[in-house]
Image (spheres, rainbow, N blue to C red):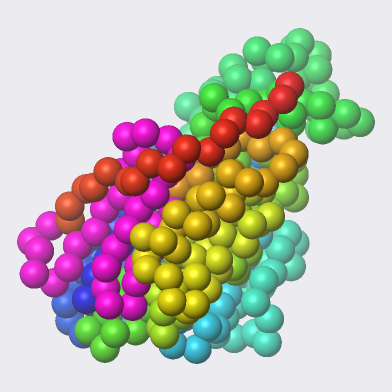
Amino acid sequence: MILLASTNANVGFPAGMEILRKGGSALDAVEATIRPVEDNPADRTVGFNGYPNILGDLELDASIMDGRTRESGAVGALKGVIPAISVARKVMETLPHVLLAGAGADRFAAEMGFPQTEALLNPDVIAAREAILKQDMTDTEFATLATSDNLRQWVRLATDPERTYGTVNVIAQDANGNIACGVSTSGWAWKYPGRLGDSPIIGAGNYADNRYGAAACTGMGEMAIRASTAHSIVMAMKLGKSLTEACELAMEDLNALGGNFIGRMNLIALAKDGTPAGYSSLPGKTFIYQTDEMETYVEKERTLVEIEERWAE
Ligand code: ASP
């Protein structure tokens, strides 16, 4: 039994481990681990008080995958409803679909009884958006952004690589050996409205298959979408590669992408024998995991595989 995650999931580990220790399912553990992260106002990259899109609206992406059956549920650009991970799970459990986006996702969340959350952003995040955007634009341009016919230009400036990003990734393997994987994010800060990252795209930011293992990503979602990164890792293990080889292959494949990208990627992955791994294109990045024999989680440095920076202004 193991719970493996990006380091910002530490606030959810007590809830997730309790489920696993009581013999609960990997799926329940993943959802329970992510929910406190979505509720954590100090986390700027997931759920409540995450950084919004360029117009100041929070748009959440989340997905969950059950490695027993590879059934999956996801929401993209969900506005106003937290917990996004639980809405994603309901998509999986109650609809013949995998992914709902935008107004349809909001409608479905309401139909399933999730309340609309009124104040999604604290004043500190509202002020941070204004301060950051005004580095590039005048007061008038900022005030009229909602009707701008050149939002793409501002998005390009505001999604500078040095500005913030992040997501929560959680993989669990329960006492029965079943594996599940969940991902939740407010996405790239100051993104174009309606932009979906890798987090709600099964195979890009999230993949789980009991037969081989699971993988999840944080970083520049556009890269993970283009390289189908999470699925690539699991597929490599299916083809006989070790966990290490599979992760290295996926990182090398990202580095081989052409065109413009920011070059930031972090992976966590689990082999079906319960071995965890963490990789990053940046030095010093960590991940956490806990098994049933451990009293608390351990934080480990991710293996560094550099990805060349290819971001042009
Ligand atoms: N992968 C997320 C996205 O592209 C952001 C991140 O993890 O940094 O939306």
In depth, the one of 253 and 10 nearer the eye is 253
The answer to whether 16 is drawn above or below residue 122 in the figure is: below
Q: Quadrant of the C terminus?
A: top right
Q: Quadrant of residue 71?
A: bottom right
Quick check: 107 left or right of 303?
A: right
- Could one spot residue 293 in this view of the protein? yes
**Residue 261 at x, y percent in the picture:** 66, 37
**Residue 130 at x, y percent in the picture:** 62, 21
Q: Quadrant of residue 232?
A: bottom right
The answer to whether 52 is drawn above or below residue 87 in the figure is: above
The answer to whether 23 is drawn above or below residue 51 in the figure is: below
Magenta residues?
Answer: 267-296
Q: Residue at x 74, y 31 (%)?
A: 155
**Residue 82 at x, y percent in the picture:** 51, 58
Q: Is residue 85 within the magenta segment?
A: no
How many labels sit on residues? 0
Q: Residue at x 23, y 47 (%)?
A: 300
Q: Is residue 275 within the magenta segment?
A: yes
Q: Residue at x 81, y 26 (%)?
A: 153
- Could one spot residue 81 in this view of the protein? no
Q: In the orientation shown, which residue stands out farthest toward the right? A: 149
